[in-house]
Image: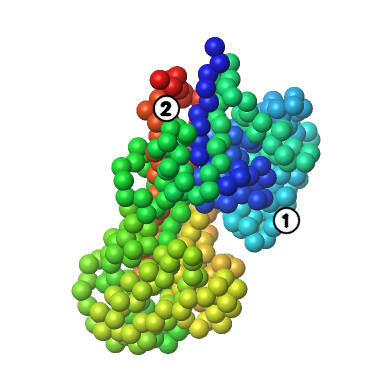
Amino acid sequence: MRSAPLRVAVIGEAPVDPVEASVVSPTDMISLDLLYDGLTSWNVDTGTWQPAIAESLSVSDDGLVWRVELSDHTFSDGSAVTAVDVERSLERLLADPNSVAAARLDAVADIKVVDSAALEIVLAEPFALLPALLSSPVYGVVPDTALDGSVGSGPMPADLDDGVDDGVAVQLVSVADADAAVDAYRAGEVDLAFVPPSFDGEVDVSVTSAVESHYVFNVTAFDVVDPNVRRAIVQAIDPARIAEVGYGPGAAPFQSAGATEVAYPLGELSIAFVDDDGGAEAAMAAELAAQVDALGGSAVSAASDIESFVALVGAGEHELVRSGWIGLFPWPQGRLTSFAGDSPDNVTGYANDAFDAALAEALATDDLTAYEAAAEILDDDGVLLPVATLNIRALVHSRVRGLDLRHDGTFDLAGMVLAEPG
């Protein structure tokens, strides 16, 4: 008897090309994860990466060359996955300098094919967590054909029929938006639906994502050039109130020190942000401004489109700017890289040799505690005003058993069981 598939509500059309996927969309990541395997994958049980298409990854003594040996892996059409396929897949992503996937690979200087089953990834600087990064579905290995989803390196092609003879299959059901996904779940049309941040009902599963929300200071601006002022503001602002108006229950707010006043004169602070259709960004900026006003300062918020926002930030015409960190694996210290003195993502004007040295030392190890030294320097300089870590929450039918969501909304089909619809 054929087993009915796990029906998952996806927003819009599920992408079949990693270049076109949104890394903050759980359903986009699910689509890629089903279609394409990567060199590594993320193991929820162990909380770390594990080999996938790669049989092994080893790094040179100087941390600059990763040797990748491939396993005996095939595409769904039976053709072998080779080092050339891996090289092409990564190079496609690197060709788009504006993508998050490419930005996270900024340490990659070259990719060299050794033979059909081996390649070398050459780095400009050590990055010990490269295998963990490559576990993201966006780095899946694609075939050298038109990416229509008919051929993949993952467990399931896009042209799935109504069921499978063995194991669990997934059927992607397109809906207009997250609210429509909830409606489809309630109507019994899907078994898994991710809820919007504002959803205030009971959910069946919630996991912490690798996406952080925060504001950063322009440390060159006169009114916040003193780190004492910045630290005092960070300690007095209540992130939970900002997160509540922006995300509702869909976020885990950071905790402040609970200070009730700032013992330094506050000038007029400009808060720059990109306006959004739902008004959440404006509401968060308004709440932040109100808290600054309550501390004896004066704050104004400046909404703009993305082009104007980039120009405004580049000109340094702000004291606070809306920002965030999109992680591709559960690496809470990942946001530190955007504060390096030579980072293209550094919009704060922050430059600290001690911080850069501590960060470089941390990047050379896979011990996450090594990042604490760099984090302490950044915190002491009061550059970052953290708001919240976003959660991924979903409604799951009771017939779905053994579902463990990863930080990006994906899941491992192995070990999952679906009871027949009753």
State the image coordinates of residue 340 (x, y, percent, origin top left): 52, 67
Most foreground residue, 225 or 328: 328
State the image coordinates of residue 184 (x, y, percent, origin top left): 46, 39
Asked whether residue 404 is in view, the answer is no
In the image, residue 288 sits, relative to residue 68, either above or below, namely below
Say few, some or many: other residues with alpha carbon within 10 Å of mark 1 (under 14 / 14 to 19 / 20 or more).
few
The disc placed on residue 49 is none
State the image coordinates of residue 362 (x, y, percent, origin top left): 48, 55
Q: Is residue 99 left or right of residue 44?
A: right
Residue drawn at x 54%, y 34% as measured from the top left: 50
Say few, some or many: other residues with alpha carbon within 10 Å of mark 2 (under 14 / 14 to 19 / 20 or more).
some
Amino acid type indicated by mark 2: Val
Residue drawn at x 45%, y 63% as measured from the top left: 278
Amino acid type indicated by mark 1: Ala
Q: Is residue 331 left or right of residue 29?
A: left
Looking at the image, which residue sits at the far top? 1
Most foreground residue, 235 or 354: 235
**Circle 2 — which element?**
strand
Q: Is residue 126 left or right of residue 294?
A: right
The disc placed on residue 400 is 2
Asked whether residue 242 is in view, the answer is yes
Residue drawn at x 29%, y 70% as measured from the top left: 237
For the C terminus, which image quadrant? top left
CA distance separating discs 2 and 1: 39 Å
Most foreground residue, 198 or 188: 188
Most foreground residue, 60 or 208: 208
Looking at the image, which residue sits at the far left? 260
Marked residue nearer the N-terminal end (2 or 1): 1
The disc placed on residue 95 is 1
